Image (cartoon, rainbow, N blue to C red):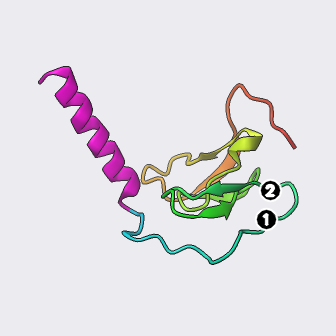
């Protein structure tokens, strides 16, 4: 298998696994999203709608991502299906509060 074919298959497989839980058609709330002060509005895991970002120690999942502006990422621990995690600081970064 040549390199181009490998990367094409790898990319398609990766996109398929990320979008498998996403809706075929996005349905977002009408009007702008209002988040509490200090909480970022970020795209959901499907890239459909803006959502209020989960904060430090909050539950997170693909539909409710962590606040990457504050150096947070969803830590899935032992959840190999990546269905539910907890927002934690990225390794090697300082958290902004």
Q: For the C terminus, which image quadrant?
A: top right
Mark 1 Cα shell of 10 Å, populated few (<14), some (14-19), many (≥20):
few
Q: Name the residue that disc number 1 marks.
A: 35
Report the Cα–Cα distance between label 1 and label 2. Answer: 6 Å
Q: Residue at x 22, y 37 (%)?
A: 9
Instruction: Pinpoint residue 96: horizontal percent, then vertical percent.
Output: 84, 39
Magenta region includes residue 9: yes
Identified at 21% across, 25% down, the residue is 4
Q: Measured from the top left, where is residue 64 in percent x and y?
A: 61, 60
Residue at (75%, 54%) from the top-left corner?
40
Figure disc tally:
2
Between 66 and 80, which is closer to the camera in this rendering?
A: 66
Residue in view at x 67 percent, y 51 percent: 66
Q: Position of residue 93 (x, y in %)?
A: 74, 28
Residue 80 relative to residue 73: left or right: left
Determine whether, in the image, residue 23 is placed left or right of residue 78. Answer: left
Front residue of 61/39: it is 39
Q: Is residue 94 magenta?
A: no
Dot 2 corresponds to which residue?
A: 39
Residue count near mark 2 (Cα–Cα under 10 Å), binned few <14, some 14–19, many ≥20: some
Lateral position of residue 13 relative to residue 93, left or right: left
Determine whether the residue tagged by mark 1 lies in a helix, strand or loop. Answer: loop
The segment highlighted magenta reads 1-20
Which quadrant is home to the N terminus? top left
Is the C-beta separation of discs 1 and 2 under 8 Å?
A: yes
SS label for mark 2: loop
Q: Quadrant of residue 59?
A: bottom right
Name the main secondary structure of what is drawn in magenta.
helix
């Amino acid at each position: 298998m040549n390199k181009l074919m490998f990367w094409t298959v790898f990319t398609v497989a990766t996109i398929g696994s990320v979008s498998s839980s996403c809706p075929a058609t996005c349905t977002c709330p009408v009007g702008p999203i209002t988040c509490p002060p200090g909480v970022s509005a970020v795209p959901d895991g499907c890239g459909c709608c803006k959502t209020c970002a989960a904060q430090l120690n909050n539950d997170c999942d693909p539909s409710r991502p962590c606040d990457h502006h504050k150096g947070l990422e969803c830590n899935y621990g032992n959840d190999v299906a990546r269905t539910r995690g907890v927002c934690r600081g990225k390794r090697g970064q300082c958290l902004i509060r």
